[in-house]
Image (tube, rainbow, N blue to C red):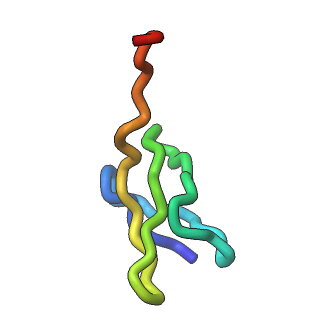
Amino acid sequence: MRVKCPICGEPVEVPDDVLPGELIDHECGVTLEVLMDGNSIRLKPLEGIKEDWGE
């Protein structure tokens, strides 16, 4: 299945057995998180993973 990248607009190949929350690295350098709404699949840029440097 192909889904449009929300950053660059290019197609992203998504496996048929993908699960919500899975991460996909795209050619444009962004990591995308899989979101599912019923039978439709959306991708959003991954947010929230930041280093805390031991704080």
Residue appearing at x 62%, y 70% in the figure: 18
Residue appearing at x 36%, y 38% in the figure: 48
Residue appearing at x 36%, y 57% in the figure: 44
Number of numbered markers: 0
Q: Is residue 46 left or right of residue 12?
A: left
Where is residue 29 drawn, in percent x and y?
46, 38
Q: Does residue 6 lie above or below 29 as drawn? A: below
Quarter of the picture holding the N terminus: bottom right
Q: Is residue 7 left or right of residue 4?
A: left
Q: Does residue 39 lie above or below 18 as drawn? A: below
Where is residue 19 drawn, in percent x and y?
59, 69
Q: Does residue 12 lie above or below 26 as drawn? A: below
Q: Nearer the viewer, residue 13 or 33?
A: 33
In the displayed orientation, state which residue is furthest to the bottom: 39
Q: Is residue 1 left or right of residue 55?
A: right
In the displayed orientation, state which residue is furthest to the front: 55
Where is residue 55 drawn, in percent x and y?
40, 12
Q: Nearer the viewer, residue 52 or 27?
A: 52
Residue appearing at x 35%, y 42% in the figure: 47
